[in-house]
Amino acid sequence: MAWIDPGNPDGFFAQRMAEHAADMEYHGCYSRVIRVSASQPNMARNNVVREFLEGDEPWLWTVDADVVTDKGHPMKLWLAAQDYEADMVSGLNFLWKHNTTVVPAFFYEKGHTLEQRYNWLPEHGSEIAACALGSVLIHRRVFEAMPPARTEEYHWFDMLPEAEMGINDGTGMVGTDVQFFLRARRLGFKLIAATDAKTTHIELMGVDEAAFIEQWKHTWEEAA
């Protein structure tokens, strides 16, 4: 289990990660914590992967330090990986877009563009193009197979020009996290959404499934 932070993780996050560590140790699947603090998130994320690859664990569970995950969360991700034969599994993460709108942190390719589906959730186990790094389980073979984006220093997490990624829509959605998953999928690795592995993104409000439903339920009622 790994995360990056600027030096002071939220208390709710720290408590939940401690609970997960205890649960995982009880079930015999806990190995170690990898925590990297750096002023540049991309550098920190790459250093997390380097430290992970020094060991022999098959899976890396990486969590953003402003995300609180539900009970049994890492095992839900692992079970989804087994059930759907996936190398990468995202939990049900949400973004507080423009500080106004709760949207799922999932991305879909549409030709040479990316899209988000604001008021819709995929089926559990559905394949997606990319996701945010809120809570993701990734097999080590993904990191081992991926060549450097441009330099070894930013091997896995870099910010390439959109033209190099083959995405030219100018939406601003092709960030470091999205680029990593697009590159991994182009190497043949599968990314799915485990919608039973729930999270709360710590913003000015709790950005989670309940907030998503409250915001969009009127549109579903109108459609019905």
Image: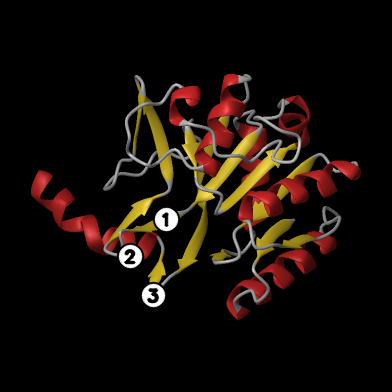
Asked which quadrant contains residue 71, the reply is bottom right
Tell which tag, 2 or 1, sits nearer the viewer: 1
Does the residue at mark 3 contact the one at mark 2 (Cβ under 8 Å)?
Answer: no
Q: Position of residue 118 (x, y in %)?
A: 28, 47
| Residue where numbered disc 3 is placed | 204
| Residue where numbered disc 2 is placed | 211
Tell me, yes or no, if residue 224 can be seen here: no
- Position above or below: 12 against 120: below
- Return the disc, 2 or 1, that comes first in the chain's sequence: 1
Q: Position of residue 213 (x, y in %)?
A: 29, 59
> Dot 1: few (<14), some (14–19), or many (≥20) neighbours within 10 Å?
many
Tell which tag, 1 or 3, sits nearer the viewer: 3
Tell which tag, 3 or 2, sits nearer the viewer: 3
At horizontal 65% and vertical 63% (from top left) the residue drawn is 39
Dot 1 falls on a residue whose secondary structure is strand
- Position above or below: 28 against 84: below
> Dot 3: few (<14), some (14–19), or many (≥20) neighbours within 10 Å?
few
Identity, as a three-letter code, of the amino acid under mark 2: Ala
Q: Position of residue 106 (x, y in %)?
A: 43, 42
Identity, as a three-letter code, of the amino acid under mark 3: Leu
Closer to the camera in the image, 84 or 160: 160
Closer to the camera in the image, 14 or 183: 183
| Residue where numbered disc 1 is placed | 94
Closer to the camera in the image, 106 or 20: 106
> Dot 2: few (<14), some (14–19), or many (≥20) neighbours within 10 Å?
some
